[in-house]
Amino acid sequence: MNEVSAYVAEGEQDAEATVRPKRLAEFIAQHRVRDQLDLLLRGAMGRGTPPDHILLSGPPGLGKTTLANIVAAELGSGIRVTSGPAIERSGDLAAILTSLATGDVLFIDEIHRIAKPAEELLYSAMEDFRVDVVVGKGPGATAIPLDVEPFTLVGATTRSGLLTGPMRDRFGFVAHLDFYAAADLEQLLHRSARILGVPITDEGAVEIAGRSRGTPRIANRLLRRVRDYAEVRADGMVTLATAREALKVYDVDALGLDRLDRAVLRALVDSFKGGPVGLSTLAVAVGEQPDTVEEVCEPFLVRAGLLARTPRGRVATDAAWQHLGRALPAGRISAPNAPADLFASDQRFP
Ligand SMILES: Nc1ncnc2c1ncn2[C@@H]1O[C@H](COP(=O)(O)OP(=O)(O)O)[C@@H](O)[C@H]1O
Ligand SMILES: [Mg+2]
């Protein structure tokens, strides 16, 4: 990364940080989750004890990290942030746990990626607020029990289906974040535009919201791209016209699908005649990691009714052909959307 783009990236992250809601009341939509969290936090504060451990699951960009920070802010406690892949040895985790102050929030992002020994250490910390740290090797090894101050673990995962049973059972509160309705994203865009000082019309917000894949992070990102366009090629106002032109430049289509989403659909429709095809084969065809295809692209493609996950593999729905502007192949047995229970984002299919 050269200096200029490093500078730009930093500016973008600042913009991201300024629009990130700090308190529960500013968190848009997700009313059920908000309500439940509100009760959980108030109940615990009333009793003067740290609340139960909290698990947040859902596709990327829907507000898990934001909520973790909000939990700490509402409780008025400190927050320590780490992630599953960052905890390689259980000693790393023990060091973090034993340094927590009473009532602190420990946020572990991508918690399904935590290494097994660290996960086991976490069990005893979550349940009994103690950890056994093993010192030495072989027959001379001894376990030293250490106390952990009462804390609240907030775990976030894009794949709660990959969590082990014992892990999931230790969370007293589990919330699943779902894609946002367009109306909620419009509200979010108006809020972000106000904070960033970007003038935006209602039609401009509607247009961007409709192409944000139901995802706040994408809505905010598209707002920044349209702002660039409006400032450079127009009078700075985000309108229906500037939004449309800008999103054309950035290759975001009418449903908000980006290049990778469309590549997945095209591969499915053109190379595999609509499927069924296995996840790894599909991922190879678009030159991506299976995890990326599964966690980043598929949840929205499924939600948009373009792709279905079935036990035999991925299949394109009729809407996929239509969206790509292709005629349905002659003799195709139409595949309407798969039944809803096959859509559960946590289920893992081949
Ligand atoms: N409910 C919400 N209200 C307002 N902004 C939100 C909301 N959820 C997410 N955002 C915005 O979207 C961005 C991405 O959210 P984040 O919490 O990082 O998602 P995740 O951790 O689930 O990937 C945040 O910076 C925040 O500005
Ligand atoms: Mg996050």
Image (spheres, grey):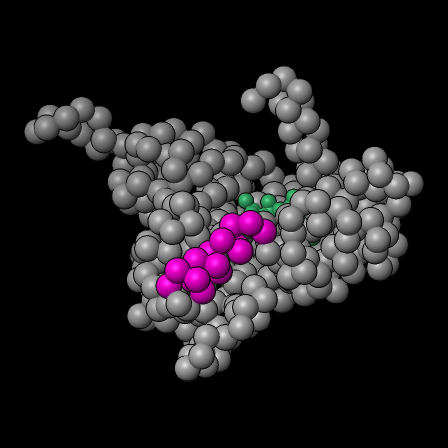
Q: Residue furthest top?
A: 3
Between residues 217 and 312, which one lies in front from this camera angle?
A: 312
Magenta region, residue range: 258-272
* Count of numbered circles in the view: 0
Q: Is residue 135 visible?
A: yes
Q: Is residue 67 magenta?
A: no
Say above or below: 159 vs 273.
Answer: above
Give the residue at x 62% y 67%. Answer: 32
Judged from the image, the quadrant occupied by ligand 2 is top right
Give the residue at x 55% y 49%. Answer: 259
Say above or below: 250 vs 86.
Answer: below
Predominant SS along the magenta part:
helix
For this view, does 344 lie left or right of residue 319?
left
Between residues 71 and 220, which one lies in front from this camera angle?
A: 220
Give the residue at x 50% y 42%. Answer: 107
- Expressed as whole percent of the image width and height from the top left, the position of residue 104 reads 53, 39
- Expressed as whole percent of the image width and height from the top left, the position of residue 333 reads 41, 82
Q: Residue furthest left?
A: 139
Between residues 168 and 6, which one lies in front from this camera angle?
A: 6
- Expressed as whole percent of the image width and height from the top left, the position of residue 106 reads 49, 40
Q: Quadrant of the N terminus?
A: top right
- Expressed as whole percent of the image width and height from the top left, the position of residue 233 reads 84, 38
Between residues 77 and 248, which one lies in front from this camera angle?
A: 248
